[in-house]
Image (spheres, helix red, strand yellow):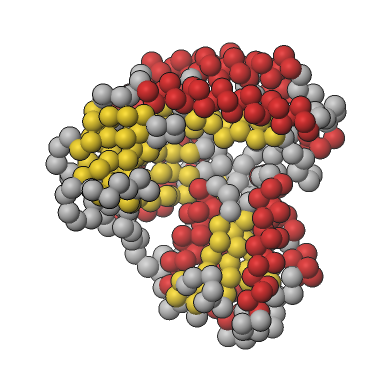
């Protein structure tokens, strides 16, 4: 059976799709291009309205494949599946399976039943009280890139007033630390050199019974010392829960990469209070100061929302001020949009869409300027790039590869050396800063 997966949203969705693909392949299924598949799986995101609308558009495109083969069917997973649920069956009759983030563990078996001609409609939408371990039908595989994601938890207990995640991914459930460590060790043994630990709020790992009393700082330290692991990252971090021990770990372990995604959302205390973020501007900046003391070369990135209900021009200026003070290397920024069922839907006054759009443009212009300055400083420095694949910057004379430095910045490096460098560390000297990336020249032998 040939299948095709389309993924929207965060790294957790990407990881879920990768696991599902491996689980199906272990059953003899074959991943195929969009024009050849018989089963289409759409893994969805509903954090904002736009990704949700993309799901409906994608299902409309899939419907066209019914003309090629009437046995074609689709499955919808992830946050929109949890949100809309069985409603997909009425709107799109060719959708036979919907599964939420907790239901993905049962998706492979359900797809197998449906693929043999079952007329049932399957909804795997129940939230589990504990983290349900997924099948280990096949050994962890490093993959060509030698990079891997590892889920350490599911769900969120924060209930920020604008966020739909607790309603679509459920309450927080930490994975048992032994299972996390076993998976990380197995991945490294199979050749993985870089691991990213994933969770809605990794800093709160272990605050529920699933973590067996192990804190995130404890887990981070145990993963960081796995023999053979070169790089360790984690995302996402809620500022209110980041422990001093986690901050200190950046300066204690070379394997922990000098980069952190630390969502700010707003630089205004009044807006942060309305968002239910449970930290203040000063608290956030104190965390930043501590991180920079622990690891002076740390690169910080963030999430920002503009136009939140009640946001004034002064509130927005507070956000710009924090951006300049921190010096974020990049940010994900969006206009606020109402999500069904969240508290902010009822908050007033709403910010005019044109005003929000103008603020977003100003914010992104500032971010572009900060990013250029951050990258420009790196010209002439030496680092090493972990090669992920061929670069789009090919000049024809030599082969250019795309890699990332320890902080996660994209580095394009040209080399006349033959062979495949994917999964290799290449010493480089940074020769030029582009708008959002770096250019380097090889400065030693790959390893």
Vertical placement of 261 versus 143: above or below? Answer: above
Identify whether 315 is placed above or below 164: above
Give the quarter of the image for residue 273.
Answer: top right
Residue 444 drawn at (x, y percent) = 15, 37
Q: Residue at x 50, y 80 (%)?
A: 1
- Residue 366 picture quarter: top right
Q: Residue at 14% across / 41% down in the picture?
A: 445
Q: Residue 292's spot in the image, x, y percent?
A: 40, 18
Quarter occupied by the C terminus: top left
Left or right: residue 169 versus residue 180 is right
Question: Which residue reaches farthest bottom?
Answer: 117
- Taking depth in this image into account, of 410 and 220 the one nearest to the observer is 410
Would residue 260 be found to the left or right of residue 123 on screen?
left
Query: 22 left or right of 383?
Result: right
Residue 363 is at least partly visible in this image: yes
Hey, which quadrant is residue 92 in on the image? bottom right
217 left or right of 344 in image = left
Q: Nearer the viewer, residue 281 or 129?
A: 281
Residue at 78% over, 46% down: 340
């Amino acid at each position: 059976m040939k299948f095709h997966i389309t993924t929207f949203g965060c790294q957790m969705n990407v990881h879920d799709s990768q696991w599902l693909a491996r689980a199906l392949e272990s059953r003899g299924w074959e991943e195929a291009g969009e024009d050849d598949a018989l089963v289409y799986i759409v893994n969805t995101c509903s954090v904002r309205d736009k990704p949700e609308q993309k799901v409906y558009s994608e299902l409309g495109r899939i419907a066209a494949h019914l003309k090629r083969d009437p046995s074609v069917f689709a499955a919808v997973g992830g946050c929109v599946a949890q949100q809309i649920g069985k409603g997909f069956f009425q709107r799109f009759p060719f959708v036979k399976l919907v599964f939420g983030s907790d239901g993905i563990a049962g998706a492979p078996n359900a797809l197998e039943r449906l693929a043999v001609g079952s007329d049932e409609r399957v909804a795997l939408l129940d939230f589990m009280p504990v983290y349900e371990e997924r099948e280990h039908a096949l050994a962890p595989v490093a993959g060509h890139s030698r990079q891997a994601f590892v889920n350490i938890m599911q769900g969120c207990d924060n209930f920020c007033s604008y966020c739909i995640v607790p309603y679509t991914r459920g309450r927080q459930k930490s994975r048992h630390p032994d299972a996390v460590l076993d998976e990380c060790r197995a991945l490294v043994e199979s050749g993985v050199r870089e691991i990213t630990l994933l969770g809605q709020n990794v800093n709160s790992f272990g605050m529920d019974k699933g973590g067996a009393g192990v804190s995130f700082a404890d887990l981070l330290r145990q993963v960081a010392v796995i023999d053979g692991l070169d790089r360790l990252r984690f995302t996402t971090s809620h500022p209110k829960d980041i422990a001093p021990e986690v901050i200190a770990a950046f300066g204690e372990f070379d394997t922990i990469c000098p980069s952190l995604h630390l969502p700010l959302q707003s630089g205004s205390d009044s807006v942060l209070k309305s968002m239910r973020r449970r930290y203040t501007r000063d608290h956030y900046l104190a965390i930043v100061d501590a991180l920079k003391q622990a690891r002076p070369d740390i690169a910080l990135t963030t999430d920002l929302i503009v136009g939140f209900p009640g946001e004034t021009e002064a509130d927005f200026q507070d956000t710009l001020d924090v951006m300049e003070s921190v010096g974020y290397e990049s940010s994900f920024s969006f206009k606020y949009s109402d999500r069904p069922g969240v508290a902010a839907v009822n908050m007033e006054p709403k910010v005019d869409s044109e005003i929000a759009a103008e603020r977003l443009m100003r914010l992104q212009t500032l971010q572009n300027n900060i990013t250029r300055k951050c990258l420009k400083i790196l010209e002439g420095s030496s680092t090493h790039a972990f090669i992920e694949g061929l670069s789009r910057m090919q000049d024809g004379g030599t082969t250019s590869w795309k890699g990332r430095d320890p902080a996660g910045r994209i580095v394009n490096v040209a080399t006349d050396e033959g062979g495949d460098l994917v999964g290799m560390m290449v010493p480089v000297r940074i020769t030029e800063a582009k708008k959002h990336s770096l250019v380097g020249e090889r400065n030693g032998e790959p390893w």
